[in-house]
Amino acid sequence: MERLAEQLRAVIVATDEYRRAMASAFGVGVHEAAVLGELLHEGPLPPSALVKRLGIASASVTALLDRLEAAGYTRRERHPTDRRSVLVVLTPGGRAAIQASFALFSADVYQAVAHSEPEHIREFTVVLARVAQGLRERAAQPGALTEALTEQVRSAGKEDHPAG
């Protein structure tokens, strides 16, 4: 199991590197690229939803959206049912760019597993979904996460300094 966790960490690190490279190719930062992905998969969103999804400050999202608009990837539109709110939407150019990004990502993943047995790919896909769900569930409970982390640190400290 430890080897699995190490390999999953390697995938996460490689994904982060890939995301940074892709964002750079767009001429935007990683958070800007994440916004484009959210808008592609979730549709138009208010800035407040982007703040929650990205875990950044409102002021940071405003500046980020200004940069995406200046690059021609997004625009703000009035919310159709809430006159006090706006929605961030992809422009046709922004949609084309982020769709191309995901198409390239899919092609790169396919290339990496092209010589694997189809049943292994199906099983791996199920396992990845379970891992993602487990991580989401843990992340959704910040108090329990803090408690578990504190206990792990405490246990590691006891191993480093045995009583006696």
Image: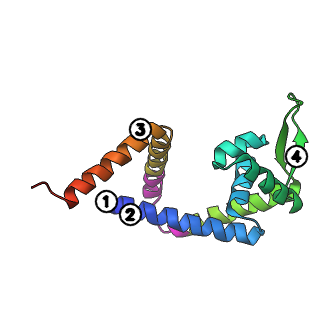
Three-letter code, disc 1: Glu
Q: Amino acid at mark 2?
A: Glu
| Residue 116, image x, y percentages | 46, 65
Q: Is residue 119 magenta?
A: yes
The residues colored magenta run 112-125
State yes or no: discs 4 and 3 in contact (Cβ < 8 Å).
no
At 85% from the left edge and 39% from the top edge, which residue is drawn?
86
Residue 6 - label: 2
Q: CA distance from mark 4 to mark 3?
A: 37 Å
Let me know if residue 68 is in the magenta part: no
Q: Which mark is residue 76?
A: 4
Mark 4 and mark 1 in contact? Answer it, CB < 8 Å: no
The earlier-in-sequence mark between 2 and 4 is: 2
What type is the residue that disc 4 sits on? Arg
Q: Which residue is mark 3?
A: 144
Location of mark 1 (residue): 2
Decide: is 30 above or below 45.
Answer: below
Q: Dot 1 lies on which element?
A: helix
Q: Helix, strand, or loop for circle 3?
A: helix
Residue depth check, mark 4 versus mark 1: number of the one nearer the observer: 4
Q: 10 Å neighbourhood of mark 1: few (<14), some, or many (≥20)?
A: few
Residues at discs 3 and 1 in contact (Cβ within 8 Å): no
Q: Position of residue 72 (x, y in %)?
A: 88, 60
Q: Main secondary structure of the magenta part?
A: helix
Q: Amino acid at mark 3?
A: Ala
3 or 1: mark nearer the eye: 3
Quote the CA–CA distance across marks 4 and 1.
Answer: 46 Å
